[in-house]
Image (cartoon, coloured by chain):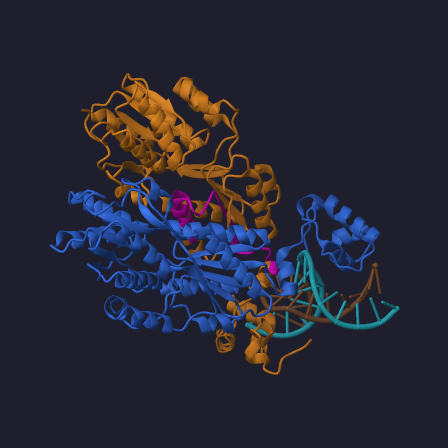
Chain colours: A blue, B orange, C cyan, D brown
Amino acid sequence: VEQSVHASAARAATIKDVARLSGVSAATVTRALRGHPRVLPETRRRVEDAAQILDYRPHSLAQALATGASQTIGLLLPSTGDRYWGEVAVGIEERAAEDGLAVLLANSHGEVSRAERMLELFLTKRVDGVIVTGGAGVVDLGRLSRRGAPAVFIGWDPVVEAGAAEAAETLPPKTALDLVRSSARPDAEVGSDDLSTSGAAVRHLLELGHDRIGFIGAGARESAMLRLIGFRLALDLAGLRPWALERSDGSLEGGRRAAERLLRGDRAPTALVAYDDLVAIGAMRAAHTLDLRVPADLSIVGFDDIDVAAFVEPPLTTVRQPKRELGRLAVSLLLERLDGTAPPIYERRPGKLVVRESTARRA
Amino acid sequence: VEQSVHASAARAATIKDVARLSGVSAATVTRALRGHPRVLPETRRRVEDAAQILDYRPHSLAQALATGASQTIGLLLPSTGDRYWGEVAVGIEERAAEDGLAVLLANSHGEVSRAERMLELFLTKRVDGVIVTGGAGVVDLGRLSRRGAPAVFIGWDPVVEAGAAEAAETLPPKTALDLVRSSARPDAEVGSDDLSTSGAAVRHLLELGHDRIGFIGAGARESAMLRLIGFRLALDLAGLRPWALERSDGSLEGGRRAAERLLRGDRAPTALVAYDDLVAIGAMRAAHTLDLRVPADLSIVGFDDIDVAAFVEPPLTTVRQPKRELGRLAVSLLLERLDGTAPPIYERRPGKLVVRESTARRA
DNA sequence: TTGTAAGCGTTATCAC
DNA sequence: GTGATAACGCTTACAA
């Protein structure tokens, strides 16, 4: 082994260096530093001092190899560029850091093959567990668990037959709900309480006197279907029917186009519930283009309360999701699963209606 | 060593298993699998088959320990919740994945202590290099290099004296520029070409006949100072002076407040260059609140072209930054530095003016 | 071309 | 309480 002349300056101190300096064995160094109960206080002090002097940091890869735990978790996001998931990621990273866990990041961009590849990378890197976000119903749950990596999902998308999105629109709401919920699910999943939260949005519009309320969804992802079903359920309760339903891809442009279709017909609604804020902002754009005033001619409510929601024109009424909290919660659940198995869990957190200026009493 | 009866099912295959099955030594397995030139084709095939059969994946932590390279880089962001940095992160993650590098993520939230702590975590995890984004002028460059971790910065904030932000406003532009550029810099840095890009924004407004042009900055971060200086330089060239200067913290709300101050006075500008799209959108909000029409009464141009920029009311004229490209570039530069040292580099990428509806000819 | 053996930096299991 | 010593899974001289 080649060693530079200035070895001490170049090379990071190892446990052996500390052992030598403090006059004990490497084994004792570990014990002293890891808080093992049976170490003489005096010994512990000597070791700690030596470690301090040498600026010793345990080599975490070596630790991982020896212990079998890498103290690292994998985080699979649709995209860090997405402001919703970006915020969720903040909560995840924050909570993980509190427990000294490092976070390995990957974006799936909604592509199955990419998701699989990145998950594989995580497993190669020997993560202790993974958090999969943004509905990757396609992820092979079996493989994950076979490989011994506990996983927590945020926003699981059930693997449903082709017609699921349509079913959520047409089947009796309760039936549709059963259908959505019947799919195989992961052991641990957290998310927002889409069903009730969507109801809150509808009730707000009902209170404002609206009865021609439309909905713009976002395909077959679970949150979209649940929000739609919640929407229908709430209308049912008021003895109303959805005035119009449109689908989008959940993007700004998708929202704009869907709203355009909705508003150009002769069955234009007076109020609109959008899948999320992005779709809602897209819809507002469409309204403006068509010379409709928001909220005078059209009320709009979104979901999430992303940061710009309060700054668009007019400021958007929306249902705030506890984004960071969801992230933190996911890590906590994962932590529980890291040592031993925990019971299956399906946690929903409520959103909160934030009334701003995009909704108004029906003209 | 305890071994379950179903060892083969429970335990992941190691290199020894592959060696045994293919009838060679572990050393040969490595060589065969890593593409070492001197392996008999026949042997290589046998090994590959065995690996395939056993579903063998090298334990990357063990590899890292043996080779000294973890094939992992650390990414320090201000926040994944920030849409600009979120997009940059997409480019980084994407480019890294192409080279099989894993990305360790951490958010600094602009806090020095947090940044230091996370950087420390990265080093503990033995990352091969780090990418530090969003102006962390406070990061101890010396320590990073002493610890042998190459670093690439995206958006370095020079460590400047307290009055720097003011200097950028008051000193002769060229002098201010020298001042900003005089600060110690990291070896490798990439970013947008703020100076020229800002000029493009100003020229656009000049062409529209504006001569009362204001600027809303964002403190002492380098990009803010350079954009301000570019702004002043471009006005100088036209024989004009800045009509008004305001500072903000670079947030939506900060932009709103700054614009409010600017627009309520009797020296209200007819056009505004904002530090970035967030500030610009905040400013638009202020304008609307004050019953000013955009762009009829006030033209506004932003920077970045974040996704909502095209969907706010009115759609925002802005300078598009090559966000993902910057991220990719940073990884490429880091890659060069990973093996051996590369020459210092300071790469600027130009932005592109995207004219939409928030700017118009002066009334 | 291939095998042997040492080593990467820890931790865990024994003894003492 | 502490020290040897053997793992952990892989790579890389050095021999053969």
Residue B81 falls inside the magenta stretch: yes
* Percent x, y of residue A187: 48, 69
> Which residues fall within the magenta stretch?
B65-93
Image point (40%, 17%), residue name: B172
The residue nearer to you, when weighing B127 against A207, is: A207
The residue nearer to you, when weighing A16 against A277, is: A277
* B106 on left or right of B299: right
- In this view, the residue farthest toward the left is A266
Q: How many marks?
A: 0
* Percent x, y of residue B9: 55, 79
Tell me the quadrant of the picture where the N terminus of chain B can be found.
Answer: bottom right
Q: Quadrant of residue A68?
A: bottom right
Q: Is residue B194 visible?
A: no
Q: Quadrant of residue B272?
A: top left
Image point (59%, 60%), residue name: A70
The residue nearer to you, when weighing A193 against B92, is: A193
* Percent x, y of residue B57: 52, 69
* Percent x, y of residue A13: 70, 49
Q: Is residue A333 visible?
A: yes
Give above or below for B311 relative to A28.
above
* B58 on left or right of A2: left
Give above or below for B11 relative to B218.
below
Residue A354 falls inside the magenta stretch: no
- In this view, the residue farthest toward the bottom is B5
Tell me the quadrant of the picture where the C terminus of chain B can be found.
Answer: top left
